[in-house]
Image: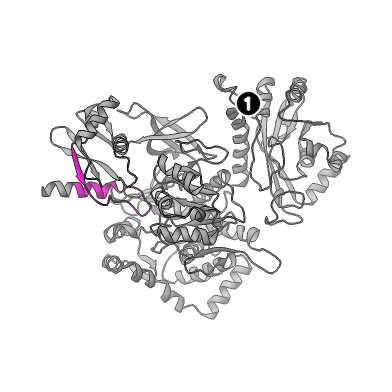
Amino acid sequence: MTKFLIRFLLRAIKIRVSFQLNEKDYPQKAIYVSNHVSWLDPLIMFAFLPNNPVFLLHTRLYRNKWLRFFLRQAEIIEYNYMDVQDTKKVIELLNQGRCCVMFPEGCMTNNGDIMKVYEAPAVIADRTGANLVPIWISGAEYSPFSETDIHQPHRLFPKIKVKVGAPHDVQMDEKLKKNRDYLRDLTYHLLNDMRFNTNYKTNLTLFHQLLRVSRIYGKSGLFSRRKIIEDINRQPQTYMDILLKSYILGKKFTGFTRKSERVGLMLPNTVANVVAFFGLSAYARVPVMLNFSQGSSVVCSMCRTAEVKHVITSKAFILKAKMQDTVSALEKEGVKIVYLENVAKKISLKDKLAGLWAYKTKKIPVEQKTSDEAVILFTSGSEGFPKAVVLSHSNVVANIQQTCCMAKLSLQDLMFNSLPMFHSFGLTVGTFFPLFSGARVFLFPSPLLYRTITELLYELKATITVATDTFYRMYTKISHPYDFKSVRLCYAGAEAVKEDTRQQMAERLGCQLMEGYGTTECAPILCVNTFLFNKFGTLGRLAPAIEYKLEEVQGIKHGKELCVRGPNVMKGYIFADNPGVLVPVKDGWYHTGDVVVVDDLGFVKIVDRVKRFAKIAGEMISLTAVEAIANEIWKSEDFRCGIVAIPHPKKGEQIVCVSNSKEASKEQFSQKVQKKGLSELYVPSVFMFKEEIPIFATGKADNVSLKKWVLKELEEK
């Protein structure tokens, strides 16, 4: 009777429980493992789980009199996760055919995230042959019964969803059974996968997702709204501001565009860029993020590839960035330039009232499918002319949720994003990730203004930064140690993080670099190091819901090519030689082109890139390895080099080393190669001097431009 009443009351306060299988199909011998977000958790388990499980409660839960009163008809045991005798008792219970409920974090979360997980569930499952059944509770962290931070948007009756997963057999590698990290990881990743499956909404477009988070995180009181986004103009905006402007501006865009049209966006990191993006997205137009840093010819190529007929930009930006030549080149291509200043002048009172009504009714202007195109980005061009990468709404929303499962943001966090939004890292991680997590974001227009950036970090008290190794290296040289005092997370991507950069960030600025890895084609995050799972020299573990396989690459002995499949993998490419035609990903598998090794704990390490090899006299020589040798020889902090392969009439290809040091010589390189016991084929045939090694706006090496320069210089000689 008590169980029935508790179930009735829980359902009355909007608690919904779903099972992945039929309740009868859950085994009697099982360990239910759940995240722990509120005092309601044991009551929910008692009311809804089958087979009358035994409750293993940590000391604080067990000693709560009210909880024990409501659970008086259940069998409860005080359980210490570090006590061997307690573990033996549980093993005996399971061997008698009982099932149990455990909260493997050992205490209640204070931020809604998974905290440390004990190895006990995996050990017990292995010893007894019991199945692990993961459970994820979401929404209870906003209830009065939680212990989450006071800044969380608490409500009296929040919607609470509980999802009970399928049973999992615990199959352990015999070599790793005594590895505590391995044992903890088994349970943690079961819970993390359940978190993704529960929180990932497959029916949400980007604009719908923005509406949803505005309802959750938009208010800071009865009459006040939270300022969540700001740029260099220093006019903070609320969710309401962004949505209102998106409704109004998007409606004006429909006057010169059609549904599903691909529309170019050529704007810096500003609030206006975000508003223009969501304005287009709300009315089913596809934003095409144009990389204006690569020059007019590349921008024109991008517009041809994606069949862009209109480009939205700003007069002020064009004048300040001195991009009149790019505008002229686009106009010659037949592309119409639309200036935001001109659109703003045409907005009437009627338009504003219509936008306000749409906001108040939370109207979705144009219904779209989540499989529809959401945004088009371009590859960096490091392997040739930029290809268009087509991402759907579900691709981007899934990747944001995957990122949330690896790095939880709080409402007090401030993301400082200086990476351009035409780069997938700057768009998804630097902008959408905090915006959809309720955190604040500051958009800065250029990552090259190092001194201004460090001063702003100090002034704004930013807590999270995203950048590349090149930019972090510069911060270590010019920053005052106090500039980074408030920063708790420094994410690095787009290029490999050098060991000395990591050391300088830690020793001088007191920040730990969290290196991650992704590709534009994967929206972009694939894996990242976190505080819970961090291994220097690797890129972290793969995100939830990503399958991977390793394929042999002819001529490469160490490592295999990483291939991935998941909800974040792109719809396909549009190639420059076949404009407007989408080439989908074959069987859903994306071949990254990166040669990796994956260790026993799942940490990924890139050892090379398939297309960064030179074939000399029939042998495959890694250009990445050659670059590493050069950096070993000339260890100066200011040393920069680029390694490229160019055609050779007899050998097939030859290696060229371009550096900013006049001391670099073939003799020194040859000596180092001999000491390492490597073939002389690793020694570059040509050494050239160049003061500035070309890089992209993201800090990534521009090998295409470097190779063109080398060929031109050698021809002139």
User: Between residues 458 and 604, which one lies in front from this camera angle?
Assistant: 458
Q: How many marks?
A: 1
Q: Residue farthest to the left?
A: 717
Q: Left of 226 or right of it: where is 521?
A: left
Asked whether the viewer can see residue 497, the reply is: no
Depicted 60 relative to depicted 85: above or below: below
Place of residue 612 in the rendered image (x, y in percent of width and height, measured from the top left):
30, 38
Where does the image place residue 477, in percent across and percent down from the top left? 40, 51
Place of residue 192 in the rendered image (x, y in percent of width and height, measured from the top left): 60, 39
Local packing at callout 1 (Cα closer than 10 Å; few below 14, some 14-19, many 20+) is some
User: In the rendered image, which quarter contains the N terminus?
Assistant: top right
Q: What amino acid type should be assigned to the residue bearing mark 1? A: Asp
Q: Name the residue under label 1.
A: 169
Residue at 49%, 44% (x, y): give it: 506
Q: Nearer the viewer, residue 5 or 270?
A: 270
The residue segment tinted magenta is 685-710
Which residue is located at x 58 percent, y 38 percent? 532
- Residue 508 place in picture, x, y as percent: 47, 47
Say which quarter of the image contains residue 453. bottom left
Residue 411: quarter of image: bottom right
